[in-house]
Image (cartoon, rainbow, N blue to C red):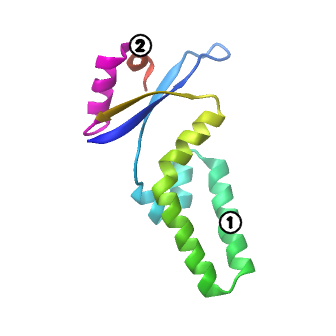
Amino acid sequence: MRVWTVHLRPPVAGKPPRAVLLRDGFALWALVAPLLWFLAHRLFALAAFYLAAVLVLGAALPAEPAIALSLGLQVFIGFEARNLQAWWLGLRGWRTEAVVMGRDADAAFLQLAAWRPDLAHVAV
């Protein structure tokens, strides 16, 4: 079973509320290609921070330590990418409303619908 967190954006400026499910856990593609993963998930500021960190490491350190630290950064991002995504949603006004478990996104959504139909109604 996988764990999913449910994040809710309250209604703002005439927009209806919206909920989204984020899977918790390791993100393999964030480990392999962090910049592309950030861009694919519309985390543009985090992509810019990652790119800046890699460029600074490459410019400030010799090749071997820079590569080792960059790989360490990628491993950290692989483990924390989904938490960074949830954190970024929190900065934009989203609230963590629930935690559900399911085999996949559909099972997690059905679990949410059974437990909190009000959230499932606004989930995307």
> In this view of the protein, which residue sits in the foreground, 28 or 42?
28
Q: Secondary structure at mark 2?
A: helix
Asked if disc 1 and disc 2 are in contact, CB closer than 8 Å, the reply is: no
Q: According to the image, label 2 marks what residue?
A: 118
For label 2, the crowd category at 10 Å Cα-Cα, with few meaning under 14, some 14 to 19 and many 20 or more, is few
Q: Quadrant of residue 66?
A: bottom right
Q: Residue at x 36, y 14 (%)?
A: 117
Q: Position of residue 107 (x, y in %)?
A: 26, 32
Vertically, is 117 above or below 73? above
Q: Main secondary structure of the magenta part?
A: helix
| Residue 41 can be seen, yes or no | no
| Residue 66 can be seen, yes or no | yes
Is residue 96 found left or right of 103 in the rendered image? right
For label 1, the crowd category at 10 Å Cα-Cα, with few meaning under 14, some 14 to 19 and many 20 or more, is some
Is residue 45 found left or right of 81 in the rendered image? right
The number of discs equals 2
Q: According to the image, label 1 marks what residue?
A: 53
Question: For the residue marked with disc 2, what is the amino acid?
Answer: Asp
* Distance from the alpha carbon under mark 1 to that under mark 2: 41 Å
> In this view of the protein, which residue sits in the foreground, 124 or 98?
98
Magenta segment: 102-118
Question: For the residue marked with disc 1, what is the amino acid?
Answer: Ala
Quadrant in the picture for the N terminus: top left
> Is 23 within the magenta?
no
Quadrant in the picture for the C terminus: top left
Q: Residue at x 65, y 69 (%)?
A: 54
Dot 1 or dot 2: first in sequence order is 1
Q: Residue at x 65, y 36 (%)?
A: 91
Q: Position of residue 44 (x, y in %)?
A: 64, 49
